Amino acid sequence: MNIDRTPGDFRRAEPVSRPGPVGRVWGGIKRWSGDNPRLSRVVWFTVGLLLLALLIWAIYPAKNSGRDGRIGQGAQPVGVARAVSGDINVTINALGTVTPLATATVRPQVGGMLVKINFTEGQMVKAGDVLAQIDPRPYQAALDQVRGQLARDAATLANAKVDLARYQALQAQNAIAAQQVSAQAALVKSTEGIVISDQANVQTARINLGYTNIVSPVAGRAGIHLVDIGNIVSAGQSNGIVVVTQLDPMSVLFTIPEDNIRTVLAQVNSGAVLPVDVYDRSQTNKITSGVLSAVDTVVDPATGSVKLRALFDNKDSKLFPSQFVNVRLLVNTLPGQVTVPVPAVQRGADGAYVFLARPDKTVTQRAVTIGIQDGNKMQILSGLKAGDTVVVDGADRLRDGADIEIPNLTGKIAAPSGGAGDEAARAARRAQMQEAMTKACSADIKKVCAEATNARETRMCLFRNRDDLGADCQKAMSQMRQAGGRRRGGGGGGQ
C-alpha cells in the first residue's frame, strides 16, 4: 500500500518529558497523601512543627560555653557599685491624714437677726475676734429692765435695814415687842435674797447681750460663711455661722501595725524625740518634717493597728486639713552598717545573693543575708564587707564565673572580701563542697564525663553540660559556686 505524504504532513514530533527523581518522589508523596488523607494531615502537621522548631533554633541566640565555661562569647557590660559602711535608718512607713488640732463650728448662743459679718472668707482670725453680730437691742432692753428691778429691790432692802436698826434700839429700851424686831429681821433677810436674785438676772442679761457678738473660739482660718446678713438665727442651730480651722501647728494621724508598737514605745519611753517626715501621694516629694507627739493607748481590734499623732510646724500652710499623706517614722539609726544599692541584691531559690566583681573582670555569686531597706540602700548582715564591688545593672544576664565589661570604670576593683585572710578556711570549704558535688554528680560523671582524667577536667565537663545534669548535681554545683569554690565558671583550678 502506498501512502502519499506531502511535505506539510511531516511535522517534527515534540519530545515527551519524563519526571526527574524529585518529581517522581513528589508524585509518590501526592499519591500517598491522596490514598491516606487523615494520616497525611498528621504527618504534614508534624513536619510543619519540626520546621518551625528548626527556624527558632536557628535565629535564637544559643547558649555557648567557652573552653573555660564562661557564658557567651564576649564579656557582658554591667554597672557596678561598692559596698559601703555607714548609718542606716530604721523607719516605719504608714498612711496618714492631716487632722487639725481644733476645728470649731461657730454657732450663735442667742437668737435674733444677723446684722453684721466681720470676716472675709479664708481670713486668718484669732481667738476672741468678733466674727458676726446679732441685733443687740432686745438684749440691751432686757438688761436695763433687770437693772431697774435690782435698783428697786436694793432700795427696799436699805429701808428694811434702817427699820431693823431702829427696832433693835427700841427693844434695848424695852419700848417695843421682841416679836416685831424678829419680823423686821426676817423681812431684811427676804429682801436680801430678792436683791441677790436681781443681781443674777442682771448678770444673765449682760451675758446674753455679750452673746450678740459672735466670736471665734480658736485661732485659725475662717471658712465660707453659712448664714447671710438679715437671716434670723437661733441658739445652737446645726449649721452655725462659719467653721474656723486651726492650721498651725498641724497634726497628722496615722496607724502602724501592732507588731511595731513595742519598738516605738521603747524609744518614746527612753525620752527620744522621733522625727516624722510626710510625703505626697507619689512618695517622691517631701512635704515637711515634724515629730511624734502621741501614741494611742489601745489597739484597734478590727485592724490590728495603733493610732499615732505627729505634730508639724505649718506656718507655710503646706499641710491642708483632710489631706492624704505618706508618713515615714524614723524609729532608730544603726551606725556602721554595710550597705549596697537595692538593685545589687538578687533573689533565688536559695535566698538572696549578689554578684561580686573580681579584679580579672569576672564575677562570682555570693550568698548574703539582708536586713532592712532604707530608701535605695539595703543592709547586708553577712556575706559582704565594705569595699566589695557588686553588680547593680545587668545582673539578670550573668551567671557565676561570667566575664564582664565595666564601662567608665574609675579606680581598681578590689579583691572580694574573705580572700587572702581566709584562704585556709576557703580551701577546707572547697574540699568539702568538692566531695559533696562528686557524690551528688556520680551518676552524671559516668554518663557525660567518663573521659575526664582529673578533678579539674571533671568540673569543667560538668559545667559545660550543666543543662543536662540531674537536679541534685545542679544544686550541689550551685552551692559550690556560692561558696566561692571556683575561680571562674569552669573550675576551681588556675589557668
Image: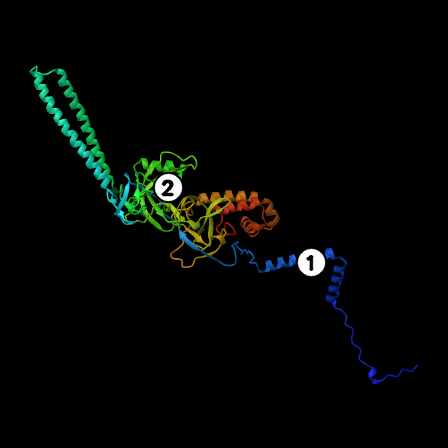
Foreground: 395 or 36?
36
Q: Point out which mark residue 109 bears.
A: none
Counting from the top left corner in percent of width and height, residue 166 is at 9, 21
Q: State how the image is colored.
A: rainbow
Q: Give the residue pinned by disc 2.
A: 254
Q: Nearer the viewer, mark 2 or mark 1?
A: 2
- Distance between the Cα atoms at labels 2 and 1? 67 Å
Dividing the picture into quadrants, the one containing residue 249 is top left
Residue at image coords 23%, 39%? 139
Farthest residue toward the right?
Answer: 1
Residue at image coords 56%, 57%? 62
Counting from the top left corner in percent of width and height, residue 32 is at 76, 60
Q: Amino acid at mark 2?
A: Phe
Residue at image coords 20%, 34%? 146
Q: On the rendered image, what quadrant is the N terminus found in? A: bottom right
Determine the secondary structure under disc 1. helix
* Number of marks drawn: 2
Q: Point out which mark residue 44 bears.
A: 1
Foreground: 2 or 477?
2
